Image (spheres, coloured by chain):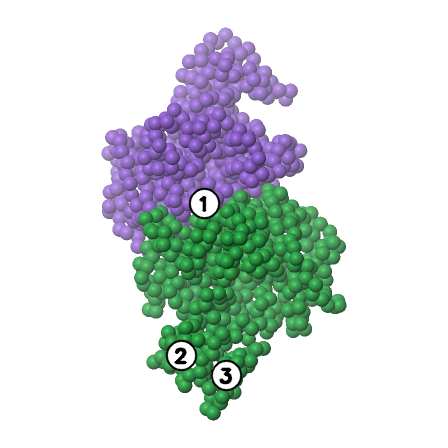
Chain colours: A green, B purple
Amino acid sequence: MLGLMQDRPLSLPHVFRRVERQFGHKTVVSGRVGGETTMTWAQVCARVRRLAAALDELGVPAGARVGTFAWNSHRHVELYLAVPCTGRVLHTINHRLFGEQITYIVNDAADDVLFVDRSILPVIWPLAGTFTTVRAVVVMDDGSDAEIPDDDRVVDYEDLLGRAGDTGGEFTVDDENTAAALCYTSGTTGDPKGVLYSHRSVVLHAALLLMVDTFGINERDVVMPIVPMFHVNAWGLPYSAMLCGADLVLPGPAMSPPELAGMLARHKVTFGAAVATIWRGLLPLLGRHDFSAVRQIVSGGGAVDEALTRAYQEAIGVPLTNAWGMTETSPVVTTSRIATVHDGCTPEQQRALLATPGPAVPLTEVRIVGDDGREAPWDGQSPGELQVSGPTIAARYFGAHPGTGAFTGDGWLRTGDVATIDRHGYVRIVDRTKDLVKSGGEWISSVELENAIMEHAGVAEAAVIGVADDKWGERPVACVVPAAGATLTAEAVREHLRGRVASWWLPDQVFFLDEIPKTATGKFAKQRLRSQYTPTTR
Amino acid sequence: MLGLMQDRPLSLPHVFRRVERQFGHKTVVSGRVGGETTMTWAQVCARVRRLAAALDELGVPAGARVGTFAWNSHRHVELYLAVPCTGRVLHTINHRLFGEQITYIVNDAADDVLFVDRSILPVIWPLAGTFTTVRAVVVMDDGSDAEIPDDDRVVDYEDLLGRAGDTGGEFTVDDENTAAALCYTSGTTGDPKGVLYSHRSVVLHAALLLMVDTFGINERDVVMPIVPMFHVNAWGLPYSAMLCGADLVLPGPAMSPPELAGMLARHKVTFGAAVATIWRGLLPLLGRHDFSAVRQIVSGGGAVDEALTRAYQEAIGVPLTNAWGMTETSPVVTTSRIATVHDGCTPEQQRALLATPGPAVPLTEVRIVGDDGREAPWDGQSPGELQVSGPTIAARYFGAHPGTGAFTGDGWLRTGDVATIDRHGYVRIVDRTKDLVKSGGEWISSVELENAIMEHAGVAEAAVIGVADDKWGERPVACVVPAAGATLTAEAVREHLRGRVASWWLPDQVFFLDEIPKTATGKFAKQRLRSQYTPTTR
């Protein structure tokens, strides 16, 4: 027997109607080169309607991917709404990836048109010839003086909106499982893999962030997603802000610590989200501004050390808290918080708890699975691979390579992290099953980096490990065995890698060994390497 | 193109797993006759597993309705979980309805078994012969000494659980549109109508209440639903408490003002929900207890007067706030709150605002439609019929009479209330299109009451109107034209009605007129009657 409730889809047109009708008076502040722009949501929504008409004018078909290379700005927000609300797919791309990865991603997604911030154009335009499906490149002027190519494919965003009529009617997306957004992860070895979010998953995720025990985003908040809008929808924060009518503050290209600190203070930001590297960079500036409006700041994309959490507590009276997720998980799966059972803990214990991922949010489930394939108990001691299930979690990857190895037989996502879970559901990451280095919140594949090093004729063998780094969280270190008779220097290895991998993949240190220690099964014994080659041995 | 997210249903088995695994240490307090019982959620969940096995043992088929006549208690919570988590339908019934209505509802729902609190048994057992589908009556001992009939159909709840094995496996409901719960509304004329909630609507509604701008229910809360669990799932509060791990305090049959005030204070309740009549009854007791733990108290089921809101503000430092909904709407559609735009208002203006329904919650949409069938503007002035849409709103009624007149061509629910909406989405109820009296949060049909009066041989014509009442919000008043030559008294009219309508439908006052004033189209001119027959004319 089926219930008799209205068959109303969980879809972004509802989110658009809500922010347009109910919260038109709230504001969106966007940084640009040398300044900032303030708009009301009413103004943004009117532009969304023009952008929707412009996408029709550009002839972008239903279901087609619209690629964006853009900072956090009102124009990116406009794309966040107009593209999925008209049945197209918003495809946000990280312009900091290595050129070959960008080409791969644009072509794998078969992007129909691209929207590119002017300041990012110098990185993207040189790749334009490698894009096989892109029909037009729409340039969004963010105040940069970067040269705009004289090319028929190039269109100015404001010209496009100026020419477009107003889409007066209601947006509709009838099936909530329609694709809304696409984001590629570089989190696993091999080619980047696309995660194709549905309207249902995006709206449910936005709703989760409004709950008190998740982030508690509400109408009184001024939300600043420092985490980029090309990275898992900026944790879904723009959509959450629309759903509850919070003000948004978007840094644009103004990503230096002084610029970020200035925006945080000037706009009385109440909720901020960024990777730990950003928060670490802001630490020296906290004494120079008034951050009294801040109620919560969250660090994602990796562990937070208790010292950093304490430093924020002491500087602005609010501890840095942690959250855990992946591109495959929309992303928020867990958020750290002090529950009633922790009321008796010391302040130190509470801060240590806030530095860990915390319990799963509603609608999402976590489990840990041991090497024997059986679920490990929630005793805070037994480790297992962290696996995740729920309506905001990927079932497979987009495109030709669904990545079946990343999912279990019963459809749970294998995260590649090893964790414990305590009896109150609190997750702690204790190790990683995949061989990756996480630097500044972005993944570096050890295996790919090793392969690139071993392409050097003078290298017999190479192993890459991640070592703790104050600024970036982790940085790659290479352990290299030279080929017989070869003479190698660290700089020669790095020089060899330039052009082969992204510049931020270059290992900070290169150690030369006679041989790489191996495990019984012949694999690199990376635990032994890690314990030997720590930063203090530099 | 469809998104590639996991196809995980929004269903109550998730809610059960969450409260069982993550919040087993939190508590459920239940009042009973002459005392109270405290259980952990772990204990309650273990009993849910036994109850699930017991339902199998009773042979209750999938999809069958399980009727409950019960106060708010841990046993009712157990039914809230075990029945829908095993694919049956929880059918909560108001034992205060008139006997014929109860018989109609039980038979219309075709309830397979009934679960009845012992203290309610004396009201229900005399009707047992009229129930055409009920195979068993399970009695839940709430401390009452009411006689238990010696009848094969009668089973003791604790005996049943004691005999049942433990359902060790996982509950699963694969299709989120599966029916989970059924509740009849007496809110319209004619026979009561059933609203059949789906797992999807119940879970989404539970999630909505966790949002800051709705009720903000969270793990630190001690939630006391004084609103009965037979009334629209007690506003969904038990399910919200399970989803976030809040403690629950359930009054059971201990519904007198001194008992309720004692529980509120003793258990440090942080969030309470009840109709205005209850809050008004508690007012004289507020000085005798410590209510400092209370963070929010909500009144639903009708307007709140600003005086009552202010009285709470002055007595306990927290104003009474309002929420609006119907059985057909799960029920919460709007919740009152002070938004950033109201920060400049005076305290009086803010309290007046808190006494109105407020803006719609996320995922749910409201509109007002004028007599001309066109949507009225959100200007705070133009009235129109309030209509509601969303995944937690009914699409039609259960059973043979889907009540198509209650829904628009485009599938919105017609609420029967006339409202204005201001530019920030704030709803105010200004009138009612349906002819109803709302007494103590429950509807009385004027038309049915009029018909019952007119069955008296000495009555020529009768009109019933609602007049404001300090305690009940509204009470029915009858205006009666005696038949030629007949001699009538108010007591004779009331005596005639006894046995024909529920005792709380009996009009407090009966006025005798020479004729009922009529409108141009021959209908009773009830506005004129209301302006004449106010309580001061008593």
Vertical relation: A14 (above or below) A303: above
The mark found on residue A524 in the picture is 2
- The one nearer the camera, B103 or A333, is A333
Q: Position of residue A164 (x, y in %)?
A: 73, 54
| Secondary structure found at label 1 | loop
Vertical relation: A67 (above or below) A538: above
Residue type at the position of mark 3: Thr
Q: Which chain is mark 1 on?
A: B
List the residue tagged with mark 3: A489
C-alpha gap between disc 1 and disc 2: 48 Å
Residue type at the position of mark 1: Leu
Q: Few, some or many C-alpha atoms within 10 Å of disc 1 (few <14, some 14-19, many ≥20)?
A: many
Residue that extends furthest to the bottom in the rendered view of this protein:
A485
Residue type at the position of mark 2: Phe
Residue B122, picture quadrant: top left
Q: Count how many numbered circles sit on residues in the image.
A: 3
The mark found on residue A117 in the picture is none
A231 with respect to B183 (left or right): right
List the residue tagged with mark 1: B210
Kindly tell me whether residue B259 is visible in this rendering: yes
- The one nearer the camera, B420 or B489, is B420
In the image, which is nearer the foreground, mark 2 or mark 3?
3
C-alpha gap between disc 1 and disc 3: 59 Å
